[in-house]
Image: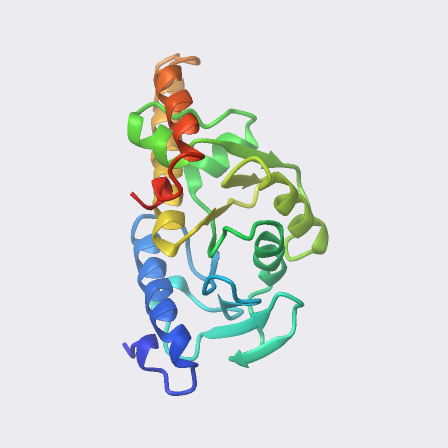
Amino acid sequence: MSDPAHDPTLDPAYRDLAAELALLGRRAVAAGLAVGSGGNLSARLPGRDECLVTAAATWLEDLRAGDFSVVGLDGALRAGRPGPSSEAALHLHAYRARSDVNAVVHLHPPHATLLDALGHDVRRLTLDQAFHVRRIARVGYHPPGTAALAEAAAAALADADVVMLASHGCAVVGGSISTAAKRAIHLEEAAVATYRALLLGDTTTAAPPGYLERVRALEGACPELDRH
């Protein structure tokens, strides 16, 4: 497999981001968080008014050099492969809404998507899940790839870093690719735990409320908290 970091057509400033996104794509598929060409990933350099996003019809486990587009926050293609992901608007609206966001992950985690479709909250049962996932927002159905979906998700990001999209997976953001990836992984882990708890007849168990409150209190005092 060719390495996106060595794509000669890509601005050197984006080569490391491309390599990170390609690695995340492989890990996401291996973890069962996406199937086939489902899902899309993006990242930007802090302060830039453009992002690197997977191109349309790319398979996350097989991202190669040339499978990325550089798109301005105004929606204009600036470099890379023509034809960015059909969900590019979802990513662009997230960056416009949150200046602290430098990575957006849209995946289709099966248990989290199932629970959301059935009207069940994804409960954080462990301290790791509570730390990484924290707040989960939900938006109703909007056709994929539309401005309506992008706008609804961006609005939900005002109070959360994880947004469930009705029957369409999740949108997860972070200050780095690593942070967004951890949130997506722990979201699905929490969903699996919630699913199993429901099978056992449990509908209330969650991580100690005091722990989540403590994490929230620390967020404002420690800007680096999300990087751990």
The relative height of residue 9 versus residue 95 in the rendered view (above or below) is below
Task: Judge by depth and name the residue closer to the eye, 211 or 115.
Answer: 211
Residue with the most extreme right position:
148
Tell me which corner region of the image, top left, top right, bottom left or bottom right, holds residue 26.
Answer: bottom left
Residue 166: x, y in percent? 60, 39
Task: Judge by depth and name the residue closer to the eye, 167 or 208.
Answer: 208
Residue depicted at x 35% and y 20%: 211
Residue depicted at x 43% and y 41%: 110
Residue 56: x, y in percent? 53, 69
The relative height of residue 171 versus residue 69 in the rendered view (above or below) is above
Q: Is residue 207 left or right of residue 117?
A: left
Tell me which corner region of the image, top left, top right, bottom left or bottom right, holds residue 77.
Answer: bottom right
The relative height of residue 165 versus residue 86 in the rendered view (above or below) is above
Residue 145: x, y in percent? 64, 57
Q: Is residue 52 left or right of residue 86?
A: left
Residue depicted at x 38% and y 55%: 177
Residue 99: x, y in percent? 55, 53
| Quarter of the image that includes the C terminus | top left
Tell me which corner region of the image, top left, top right, bottom left or bottom right, holds residue 1.
Answer: bottom left
Residue depicted at x 56% and y 34%: 137
